[in-house]
Image: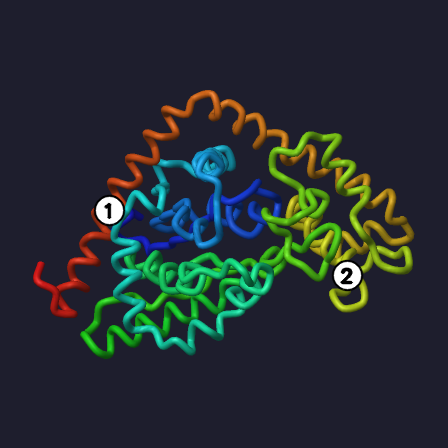
Amino acid sequence: MNDMQKQRVLSGVQPSGKLHIGNYLGAIKQFVSLQNDYDAYFCIVDEHAITVPQEPNDLRANTIAVAIAYLAAGIDPKKATIFIQSHVPAHTQLGWILNTMTPLGELERMTQFKEKSAKNQEAIYAGLFNYPTLMAADILLYDATYVPVGEDQFQHLELTRSLAKRFNNRFGDTFVIPQAFTHKETTRIMALDDPSKKMSKSAESEASYIALLDAPDVIRKKIKTAVTDSGSDIHYDETEKPAVANLLRIFAAFSDQSLTALEKNYTGIGYADFKNDLADLLINKLSPFQAAYNDLSRDKDTVLSILEDGAEKANIIANATLLEVKQKIGFIV
């Protein structure tokens, strides 16, 4: 099946902070699989990253780091299009057009805006408020049929679907109505030090996440100090044992074992042995990625060339969509 016959999938990762196993399991691992069956577009969403303040040098370094991580994890530029969001101006242009069609109340209901703005009420910017319309533009520009999303992005995807339908109803059939693509068991990986919070690149404590480039001794220490629940049995229960459930989800995802099989394997075995095995697993599984990442880091010219080629291809598709939108809303083009 060639790309013209394949349905398109699009997603992206923000270049803010260190990539961790939650990013890998919730996004990048899916990307590697999806590239084989879909016409895949994976971007580094630097314009989303600046909805909260970023240090310029860190943003540049993190943007390249995400691109290298994509490649090190197994995303093949011959199969998938990899590009930087800001290298395709149509994203912000369509984002503005969609802003003019988005009721204020719909943006005010966005949970992610409420959570992020609550953390820093003295620095709440319009970009953070309008984040969902830019995300909608990202998706709609490419006629994406499927969008890999975590639970925290479902609400944004629903807004995207609503905006697409609204535009189509008013101006005629233009946008594909996208659908969510999720992997239930790894959609939401929680913090190691607080299973009530999502694992986050911007967390205050590095003990809350396993970074993809963490050294073996660091991984072992973080898993050893990860919080657990009362009792000592290894049992999957998100309500009664949320910390253990989170560790089991991580174990299952990296070992390709079912949660039921893991529960059976660790019957009568305590937390210490379970954690030791989980640390061994993570060290073993991340080692090839880290080796590939280090090799690519020494050849950034190749990485930049891949991003340039990706942006060229993405611009062709995005500009065609944007032109159609401009014509339909009455712009002179």
Residue 199 is marked as none
Colour scheme employed for the rendering of this structure: rainbow
Q: Residue at x 55, y 42 (%)?
A: 17
Residue 314 at x, y percent in the picture:
27, 46
Q: Nearer the viewer, residue 312 or 283?
A: 312
Residue hosting label 2: 236
Quadrant the C terminus occupies: bottom left
* Residue 257 position (above or below residue 324): above
* Residue 79 position (above or below residue 252): above
Whether residue 252 is visible to the viewer of this picture, yes or no, is: yes
Q: Residue at x 16, y 63 (%)?
A: 326
Q: Residue at x 74, y 65 (%)?
A: 238
Residue 129 at x, y percent in the picture:
43, 65
Q: Quadrant of residue 75?
A: top left
Residue hosting label 1: 315
Q: Residue at x 36, y 64 (%)?
A: 133
